[in-house]
Amino acid sequence: MTERTAHRLRNAVVELFPQVESRLGDDRKRYWRLPQSTAELLVDVTADEVAALETCRRLLALNGYGEIATQLEGLTEKVTALIAPSVTRRLEPDVEAVLEAEGVAIRPGPRPGRNPAVIDSLRQAIKGCQMVRLFYNYRGREESAEIEVEPYGILFGSRHYLVAHRRGRQDPYLRMYSLPEIQRATVLNKAFERDASVSLQAFADRSFGIFQEAPRRVIWRFSGPAVRDARHFLFHPQQQVEELPDGRLQVSFEAGGLLEMCWHLFTWGPSVEVVEPAELRELYRHCLDQGGAPPSLPGQEV
């Protein structure tokens, strides 16, 4: 934007809002601002919107995302600060009523631990395209290893992973490092050039869950009462769903991660048929025959 354009836009705002205030700053530059009472007229916030922010904050906090919940709390305070005090007082009971009506219930069960200091360092490195030194606990080793990686992003889920390229490795492939196993993360004064062709979402879509392996054509067919439930499931972002003439529901997609697929399919019992791939069909059949969890597949996790 040129200085001439900036002056023109400023004059347009002053003409629209004559109550604009100006002052000369300590740096001898002139500043313009709208009084808070004017800004309040431009904001229309409902109780549902404020309640939505608070619900998200509570869910994040209860699921271990404390630092993100704190940021969201700050955002909520900034939003409500723009509202006239009289409106805020009127909204408060409405917000509480909405929160009580919605009811936030958290699914019980184990959750991965998260080190806020590690998360902050990784975020800084990812945004600045800076290398990071990890003190990482590999499985089966008593002492942590010191490695340098190029961080591309973080995958959040039932378990959390850093997706990064290991500096010094000959292969160009991204690898995953379990966040709970990262003892410390130090941002280095070393920049790296991010591969523009790499998409973190595409990387995640290669797998049904976390484990990365060569994608395969996957076809499942649901029958009986499971059809109704499966119709509302999102098994994979690129899934295709087809209603078969016999009443069954066919779901197909391409992804790796056969072990996690089998873990999930076990919850459907005999109501699902694995059509492809053959390896998954055999693994699932073994799971059903044994009446327990499938055997682990080695070599899929960093």
Image (tube, rainbow, N blue to C red):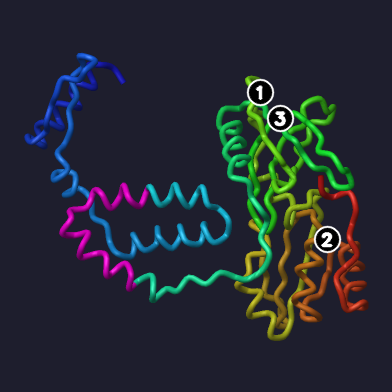
Between 256 and 95, the one lying in front of the other is 95
State which quarter of the image contains the C terminus. Answer: top right
Position above or below: 62 against 200: below
Residue 259's disc number = 2
Q: Position of residue 199 (x, y in %)?
A: 64, 39
Q: Is residue 253 left or right of residue 287?
A: left
What amino acid is found at the position of numbered circle 3 in the picture? Arg
Q: Position of residue 149 (x, y in %)?
A: 73, 31
Residue beneath label 3, please?
133
* Residue 77 highlighted magenta (yes or no): yes
Snapshot quadrant of residue 5: top left
Q: Is residue 239 visible?
A: no
**Upstream in the sequence, badge 1 or badge 3?**
3
Q: Residue furthest top?
A: 28
**Upstream in the sequence, badge 2 or badge 1?**
1
What amino acid is found at the position of numbered circle 2 in the picture? Leu
Q: How many marks?
A: 3
Position above or below: 156 against 121: below
Q: Position of residue 182 (x, y in %)?
A: 72, 42
Residue beneath label 1, please?
192
Q: Secondary structure at mark 1?
A: loop
Position above or below: 187 against 142: above
Q: Secondary structure at mark 2?
A: helix
Q: Which residues are magenta?
A: 75-97
Real-space CA distance between mark 2 and mark 1, rounded to the nearest whole angstrom = 34 Å
Disc 2 crowd, CA 10 A, few/some/many (<14, 14-19, 20+)? many
